[in-house]
Image (tube, helix red, strand yellow):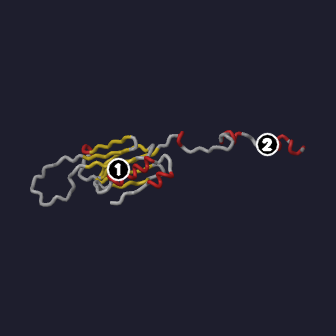
C-alpha cells in the first residue's frame, strides 16, 4: 500500500494540519473494511445523506452517536439460532462500526430505517458570525455606504445644480 506524503503541502500552508492528519489516518485505517456498504449523497448546498445497507439489523441493534466532527454508526447483531442445518452461509451475520468524519457545523438532522437501509440526513448550519461579509474600503460598512445620499442627487433636487 502506498503512503501519501503531504510534506510539501505542510511547508506552504498554515492551519491545515488537521486536514492532513485526517487524510493520512484515513489512508492507514480505511483500507480493507467495506462492511456495511454505504453511499454519501449531496442533496443541496448544505444538505447531505448517508445511506448504509444493513439488511438483517433491527433498529434496536443499532447505535448512532454524533460527537463533535465524528459520526459513529454501530451495529450489534444478535445471533439467531437456525432451526435446521445450514448448508451455506452467505449472509453476513456480524456486527460493525462505521465512522464518518464530519466538517465543522455539520449536525445529524434525522435517522430512519426502511427496507434494510439506514438513512442519516445531515445538515450544515454555519453561524451568522462565520458567514462571509462584504467589507468596504476605508472601514465603513456596506450599510453605511448605502445610507449616504449622493451629492449630485441633493443638488438636483434642491435646484442648486441649475444655479451653478
> Which residue is at the front of the view, 49 or 133?
133
Quarter occupied by residue 129: top right
For residue 41, above or below residue 149: below
Task: Please tell me whether mark 1 sits on a helix, a strand or a loop.
Answer: strand
- Where does residue 130 sit, x and y in percent of width and height? 53, 42
Q: Can see residue 115?
A: no
Could you say which disc has been placed on residue 151 in the image? 2
- Where does residue 26 sit, x and y in percent of width and height? 36, 52
Point out the tag, 2 or 1, that comes first from the N-terminus.
Answer: 1
* The N terminus: image quadrant: bottom left
Quarter occupied by residue 131: top right
- Where does residue 94 sit, x and y in percent of width and height? 21, 51
Q: Can see residue 111?
A: yes
The residue where tag 1 is placed is 119
- Number of marks: 2
For residue 132, above or below residue 84: above
* The C terminus: image quadrant: top right
> Which residue is at the front of the view, 14 or 129?
14
Mark 2 or mark 1, whichever is nearer to me: 2
> Which residue is at the front of the view, 33 or 106?
33
> Which residue is at the front of the view, 146 or 99?
99
Could you say which disc has been placed on residue 15 in the image? none
- Disc 2 + disc 1, Cβ < 8 Å: no
From the viewer's perspective, is 9 left or right of 142? left
Amino acid at each position: 500500500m502506498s503512503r501519501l506524503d503531504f510534506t510539501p503541502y505542510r511547508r506552504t500552508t498554515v492551519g491545515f494540519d488537521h486536514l492532513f492528519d485526517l487524510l493520512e489516518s484515513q489512508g492507514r485505517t480505511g483500507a480493507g473494511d467495506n462492511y456495511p456498504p454505504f453511499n454519501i449523497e449531496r442533496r443541496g448546498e448544505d444538505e447531505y445523506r448517508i445511506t448504509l445497507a444493513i439488511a438483517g439489523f433491527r433498529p434496536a441493534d443499532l447505535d448512532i452517536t454524533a460527537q463533535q466532527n465524528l459520526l459513529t454508526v454501530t451495529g450489534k447483531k444478535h445471533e439467531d439460532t437456525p432451526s435446521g442445518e445450514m448448508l451455506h452461509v452467505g449472509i453476513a451475520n456480524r456486527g460493525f462500526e462505521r465512522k464518518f468524519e464530519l466538517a465543522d457545523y455539520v449536525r445529524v438532522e434525522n435517522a430512519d430505517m426502511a427496507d434494510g437501509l439506514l438513512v442519516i440526513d445531515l445538515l450544515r448550519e454555519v453561524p451568522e458570525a462565520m458567514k462571509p461579509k462584504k467589507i468596504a474600503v476605508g472601514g465603513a460598512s456596506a450599510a453605511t455606504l448605502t445610507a449616504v445620499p449622493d451629492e449630485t442627487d441633493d443638488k438636483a433636487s434642491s435646484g442648486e445644480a441649475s444655479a451653478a
